[in-house]
Image (spheres, rainbow, N blue to C red):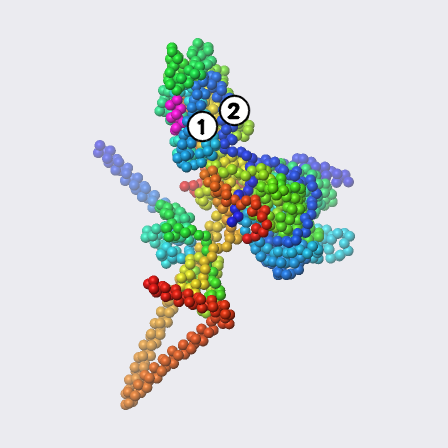
Amino acid sequence: MFLAQSSPYLKPGLSVSKMMLVVTLLMIPGILTATYIFGYGVLVNIFLAIIFALSFEAIILYLRKRPVKVYLNDKSALLTAVIIGVALPPLAPWWLTFIGVFFAIVIAKQLYGGLGYNTFNPAMVAYAILLVSFPAEMTTYWQTSTMLANQFDGQTLSFIETINFQIFGQLPVGMTIDALTSATPLDIVRTSVLNGSATIDEIHAQGKTFGMLGGLGSEWVNLAFLAGGLFMMRKGLISWHIPISLLATLGFLSLLFGSFELDSNPSPLFHLFSGATMLGAFFIATDPVTASTTPKGRIIYGMGIGALIYIIRTWGGYPDAIAFAVLLMNMCAPLLDYYTQPRVYGHKADERDDEDYS
Amino acid sequence: MLSGIIALIVLASFFGMVLGLAAVVFKVESSPVVEQIDALLPQTQCGQCSFAGCRPYAEAIAAGEAQINLCPPGGENLVQSLADLLDVEVLPLGEDEAVVQGPIVAVIIEETCIGCTLCIQACPVDAILGAAKQMHTVIESECTGCELCIAPCPVDCIEMIPVKQTLKNWRWPEPQYNANNREAESIFTTIDHVLAENSRP
Amino acid sequence: MSQSLSTSVAQKLKEKVRHLWSFPGGIHLSGKKSLSNHQPITTAQTPKQLIIPLSQHIGQPADPIVKVGDKVLKGQVIGYASGSVSAPVHASCSGTVTAIEERLIPHPSGLSALCVVIDTDGYDQWIKCSPLIGDSSDSDDTLYQTISDLSSHQISDQIANAGIVGLGGALYPAAAKLRTAERMQTDTLIINAAECEPYITCDDILIQRRPEEVILGILLMKKVVGAKKCLIGIEDNKPEAYKALLNSLRGYNNTHTEAQIEVIQVPTRYPAGGEKQLIQMLTGREVPTQGLPMNIGIICHNVTTAVAVYHAVYRGEPLISRIVTITGGAVKQPQNMEVPLGTPIRDILNQAGLNKDKVEKIIMGGPMMGFALPSIDTPVTKATNCILVSEKGELATPPPAMPCIRCARCSDVCPMSLLPQQMYWYAKARDLEKVQDYNIFDCIECGCCSYACPSNIPLVQYYRYAKTEIWDDERERNKSNIARDRHEFRKERLEKAKAAKAEAARLRKEKLAKKKALDAEKAKQEKEKSSTPSDETKAVASSSADLIQEAIARSKAKKAQQQSQKKNTDNLTEAQQKKIDEINERRRNRSSSEKTEE
């Protein structure tokens, strides 16, 4: 019996593993900036997340009787881990990372069938579950950015002290967690505006929240992720559709509503360069497994996330909204894919009959 | 309290009527289920399902008197499509029928045939030609491979042979080689085989 | 003079401002064409043996009209076209037919098909050729001088008799296609010279070396179709061929103003040479799904086909050879070789030099759409445009397929705007209806999706698998429908026979009853008449007993006679008798054993 593999016989040597690795590497500028701004906790988070993620992945693959080495090598768990590590508060205790990674890898990914079969972005599932289950830990462990600490005589932790706190919960003598941490710019803006305790101008006057572009400190992290993201786009690792439509929608909505109520709405730039906007636009929303796949679908998908981010940030219950926006749009992706099918060559534009779909 | 109960009853009966009306007005006409089942069956008329042909089996399935997994010629695909059609559980093929083979046809060994016409009478689709005392032959394109002609033959001159693979009926194999089944690589033809002399069939 | 100058200037301007459309997707591949596109065209040595498949085209295989032992001349018909969509095959060298049998043919299945095997005599003696157009030096007055003297039918008959099929890979009989195009009043002839697959240079080299033949072939095809204009699409990575065409066209566009042939460079992007993509780029129009280019007034032919048409009309030579690119890292001298059809691939590889230790894969066609040869003892056919012998590491052996991550790279590169990953999911699940909902039959199997897939999923093979499964299902359905009809018919027939039998029995009974009644009546009457009944009745009884005995004897004799007349038992040889005895023995044994079992 003659058996052969079908053509094509040319392959450019592209692989899932390589793609995941390059995306992970392109997060490094952002990670380093975040470490500089928010302290060593970021690195500790990422390190712990990677260890946990790879262990969980290996165990589950073994239990599912899949070739462990082959699938570990696809590096998707690595990327998920790094995203979780960056997304968590820098001073998060180790068990927060542990629970997050558990939900991401075991529940959101492997129980759905492993790489390629998950409906929801694993890292965002982890983040959402942690945010809902441990709201205090998820919001209070944001270390004061170095810039503020320097300007206002705050305190920072050394590398060893950070590890000591995150693993053993011990702070150096004389330090309190309150002195180390502060609310994020998005948090400040949201609570103040929601309570009506301060207008945007008043917050601005305090000088602790706004930087040149976005949130003080986090604007640099956003810029670094933007740089990495643009590089990815240039290299063709991701298409432009999702990030551009996401950022454009977010910018447009904040411009639109901002021009009505200047007092309670920060500028579009603040929305674009605060929180996890750039990380979300370029590294999270573009996760191929859970995003829409058709060109039109991807644009709508990106717009949906952008709009949801603005809505939740402005009127919702959480200061940042990447996770919920992404998860909500994940649910819509199959529907978007179905209704935005491109016109096939040689077919008329209105040819597809929807009645076939049941 | 009373008014609430009355309101609910009125609402319930109203919606019930609407639904009942809708069921009548928008009734989907479809061909009888027996026809649909019969259309799926392979029409070998072999009787391996213990019914006297495909149509009786279809009727039995429709009447709920027979399982959907009694047809070996239809194989797993048939069970699957019957399960889809009738919205029932997929059943594995019965154990006796587990021997999955490709399509086969009957061939009469001409030297041995004595022209008894018994096979002609047995053939459910009139695919055997011949007259008494004359050698018989099977029309290959019409033969369904039901094997019903084998038993009656007094001289055992009928053989079942697999349908020959030609360029017309050749099918691409489903790819087997993937991360979960890396051993499948060994099935590919090696270059030595391609270069070898006289690799004629 | 000035007018011709101005037309040429106008032509030039037209080339410059020519608007090109684009097709979606596609990929940029490294051409690897320089391996073989600068060497001259070499000629293959006459092989010792030719293996000529009778089916080298779409449609019915040709009927062999030679017998084993026949001597054939070069160019002699050895298989007639059978049916309207078919093509004849010819002997490509002179020699003796030594076999007409199934031989391995170049096909991805590795199956065999009927071939005529010819042992060549080395003389290469031509049969008398009958061209339609002669050289001006030719004294034969039966020949025409120019194309305009010929009728459309004359040319298409000549093309049909020459066994010309679409040489770009479609293999559809060229004459049938041209005639259909003529009937449908097609106005544009598109000549596909894009040759977008890497490695292959046979069209490129053919245009470079024989541009006049290309142009004349095109004029002939244009004449058959009655097309108003002709567009030649060529990828811009073949500047030499482009220039050669422009040069040889210059004369024609001035002298034959009706020629209207335009050479258009298209950007190099795979699959620019796909028929549908080339049409889209040149005209901006799309071939309707499940339709033909002729539905939008276009007929597309390959440039090699045009040259074959030229040979048939101007030289009277049938299609018995073609240019094959022999290339790849394991070939010592990559080149384009003119090879007689039926030459074993082993022979031409030996002639071009094969580094046996370096070989990794041997592919017929290009690396994107070709297939791995089952054996190099298969022959060169009308479809063989390239033999690619790769060395290790030249063509990637794909690693095991990983799960699809829905990255949509496949749909980004799909030139047909299909959704390859959806088709993959459904093909994998063997959901043949859904896979058709996603328009699998619009897939041209160009391989872009598989190429772009980071998970190394053999997408194209899944589509090929799904397509052949769908066809197979259709065949099965047709067959079962026929079987059902036949079964119903048989049931009806049996019932009718039964009814007829019952009716006959009833009639007989009635007759018998009547007769009995009549007999009784007679007997009664006779009884009344005669006074000595007992003797007579005895006699009647005895005679009837005799009659029965007689009948039995007769039937026995008849049976015996018939047995001796049994067709297969006449003139038995000893061996046959033995066999029958054995069978009888077996039957006896079987029936006895069955009895004992019972």
Residue pushed farthest top? A153
Q: Chain of mark 1?
A: A
Q: Is A95 contained in the magenta span?
A: yes
Whether residue A52 is visible: yes
At 46% from the left edge and 14% from the top edge, which residue is drawn? A146
Residue nearest the observer in this picture, C117 or C580: C580
Whether residue A269 is visible: no
Q: Is A132 contained in the magenta span?
A: no
> What amino acid is found at the position of numbered circle 2 in the picture?
Gly
User: Quarter of the image holding residue C236?
Assistant: top right
Asked if both marks, 2 and 1, belong to the same chain, the answer given is: yes
Q: CA distance from mark 2 to mark 1?
A: 17 Å
Residue nearest the observer in this picture, B182 or C183: B182
Q: To which residue does mark 2 refer?
A: A228
> What amino acid is found at the position of numbered circle 1 in the picture?
Thr
At 47% from the left edge and 62% from the top edge, which residue is drawn? B108
At 37% from the left edge and 81% from the top edge, which residue is drawn? C547
Relative side of B94 to C382, left or right: left
Relative height, residue B84 to residue A237 (above, below): below
Residue nearest the observer in this picture, A144 or A61: A61
Figure label count: 2
Q: To which residue does mark 1 refer?
A: A80
Q: Judging from the image, what secondary structure is the residue with disc 1 in?
A: helix
